[in-house]
Amino acid sequence: MNASTWRIVSLHQTFSPVDKSIKIFKVISTLEAISFLVLLGIAMPLKYIWDMPQMVKIVGMAHGILFLAYLLGAYFMYEKLKWSLQTLFIVMLCSIVPFGPFYAERKYL
């Protein structure tokens, strides 16, 4: 097969439900990590340095929802990928460390 044939074959791949779950969890993981960094790097300084608390309310709510979605997603990945409890604990612990979800995504997915 030549390169163009491989390209056509790869475009028509079907994904299993586990692959779709992993893809969804990766999106949630990335969004959660970004929201945490925005909260810490932009919203909190706006609140405490320039006395502008509005951004914390908006970003904080979005981050809270994404944080819970991340924890739920981690549990579903634990079940689907047959992770050990130690892996589940590490992935969940990564959610409270800046840049942690990026690490967990690269290492465990």
Image (cartoon, rainbow, N blue to C red):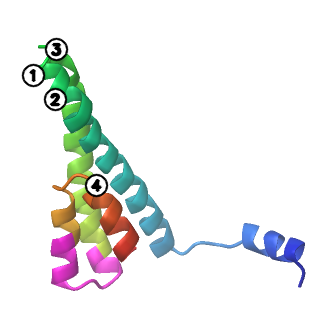
Q: Earlier in the sequence, mark 4 or mark 3?
A: 3
From this view, report whether residue 49 is shown above or below residue 11. Answer: above
- Name the residue nearer the viewer: 26 or 103: 103
Which residue is tagged 1? 48
Answer yes or no: do the residues labelled 3 and 1 have beta carbons within 8 Å?
Answer: no
- Position of 8 relative to 86 (above/below): above
Which of 47 and 8 lies nearest the eye of the viewer? 47
- Magenta part of the chain: 78-90
Q: The disc labelled 3 sits on which kind of residue?
A: Met
Assess disc 3: are there few (<14), some (14-19) or many (≥20) residues with their C-alpha within 10 Å of its C-alpha. Answer: few
Q: Residue 99, labelled with which disc?
A: 4
Q: Is residue 69 visible?
A: yes
- Residue at x 13%, y 21% (from the top left corner): 47
Can the viewer see residue 61? no
Neighbourhood count class around disc 1 (C-alpha, 10 Å): few under 14, some 14–19, many 20 upward? few
Which quarter of the figure is the C terminus placed in? Answer: bottom left
Circle 2 residue: 44
> Is 2 inside the magenta-drawn segment?
no
In terms of depth relative to the viewer, which is nearer, 91 or 47? 47
Question: Which is nearer the eye, 14 or 50?
Answer: 50
Q: Earlier in the sequence, mark 1 or mark 4?
A: 1
Q: Nearer the viewer, mark 3 or mark 1?
A: 1
- Left of 46 or right of it: where is 106? right
Q: Identity of the amino acid at label 1?
A: Tyr
Residue 8: name its quadrant: bottom right
The residue drawn where x is 15% and y is 73% is 89
Give me the residue at 28% from left, 78% from top.
79
Give SS at disc 1: helix
Q: Are marks 2 and 1 in contact (CB under 8 Å)?
A: yes
| Type of the residue with mark 4 | Phe
Q: Which residue is mark 3?
A: 52
Q: Quadrant of residue 78?
A: bottom left
